[in-house]
Each structure stands twice: as C-alpha cells, then as structure tokens.
C-alpha cells in the first residue's frame, strides 16, 4: 500500500485526536524528565530520600500542568470557560491514575515471571502499567474532563 500525502492527511484527520494525544503524551514525558533533572541538580537528591520524593512530586506536577494546557488546546480543543474547575477535574483524574500506577507497580512485578518476553518483571510491569494508565487518562480526559456540552438547538435535541 502506497502512502501518499493525501492518504496520510486523511488518516491524520480520521485519528487526529488520538494522534495528538500521543504526541502531547511524549512531550509531557519530556517536560517531566526535564523538571526531574533540574530538581535532581538543584536538590542534590543523591543524599536524601525526602529530596528525591520532592523531585518526583515536582516532576509529576510539571507534567500534569503541561498536559492539562496542551490537551485542552491541541487534543480536546476545550472551550469551557471554567478553566479552574476543568483543571481541578483533570488533576483529580491524574491523581487517580497515579495511585493506579503505584498499586500496579507494587503488586504486578511479583506476579510476573522473572523474565517476561525478554524483559525483567519490573520493566514488563512498567510497560503494562504505562499502557493502562495512558488509556485510562485518555478515557478520563475525553469523557469526564473535557466534555463538550450538547447544543440544545441541535437536530438531536429536537
């Protein structure tokens, strides 16, 4: 199957939201890593577990803030005037998936074989958790956070 520019554009248009969501996810990861790297440098996390936890929290928060604004604008194209409520909803959903990730990582590595498809159990658990968290974040964002209000004057409402 030959991919022409026209076909690629058609595929992008068809899957625009999901493609943009994945691109924003990669950019969010980069922002989080940069924030973490800066924190490691500034806080000297090698010598303190507390400072390490502060760095992890800052990394997470930087990622959430970046993800909110980029998802709002480029993925879900939200026009909700109540940005604060929307941001709180977004952050709450990310807290839920953060806990979900922590629970998965606490138990799944012990349930998997030492080597699973060539990966150590903790890496396989990380991969599984990342996929589940990404899907859950998308579902929460699409159906709970960035919901579009139905137009009462639309044909469907009649």
Image (tube, helix red, strand yellow):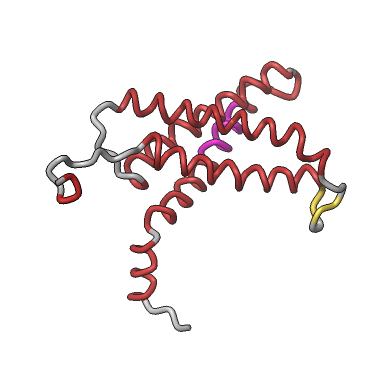
**Which residue reaches farthest right?**
114
Front-most of 62 and 79?
79
The picture quadrant where one finds residue 109 is top right
Residue at screen point 56% across, 33% down: 97
Q: Residue at x 46, y 27 (%)?
A: 91
Q: Is residue 28 magenta?
A: no
105 left or right of 57 in image: right
6 over 157 or under it: above or below: below
Q: Which residue is rendered at x = 38% and y = 27% of the image?
A: 87
Q: Is residue 152 above or below residue 15?
A: above
Residue 126, relative to residue 119: is it above or below?
above
Name the residue rendered at 18%, 42% in the picture: 151
Return the residue found at the far front: 158
Q: Position of residue 77 (x, y in %)?
A: 30, 44
Q: Which residues are magenta?
A: 30-39
Residue 67, quarter of the rendered image: top left
**Residue farthest along the left direction in this orientation:** 153
Task: Give x and y (percent) for residue 30.
Answer: 53, 42
Find residue 125 and report its horizontal and vertical position in percent: 73, 44
């Amino acid at each position: 199957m030959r991919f022409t520019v026209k076909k690629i554009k058609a595929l992008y248009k068809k899957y625009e939201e999901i493609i943009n969501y994945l691109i924003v996810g990669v950019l969010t990861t980069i922002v989080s890593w940069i924030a973490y790297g800066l924190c490691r440098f500034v806080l000297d996390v090698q010598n303190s577990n507390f400072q390490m936890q502060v760095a992890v929290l800052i990394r997470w928060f930087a990622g959430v803030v970046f993800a909110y604004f980029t998802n709002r604008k480029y993925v879900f194209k939200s026009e909700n005037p109540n940005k604060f409520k929307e941001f709180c909803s977004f952050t709450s959903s990310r807290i839920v998936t953060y806990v979900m990730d922590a629970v998965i990582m606490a138990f799944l590595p012990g349930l998997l074989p030492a080597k699973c498809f060539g990966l150590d159990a903790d890496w396989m658990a990380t991969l599984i958790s990342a996929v589940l968290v990404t899907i859950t974040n998308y579902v929460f964002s699409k159906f709970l956070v960035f919901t579009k209000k139905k137009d009462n004057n639309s044909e469907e409402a009649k």
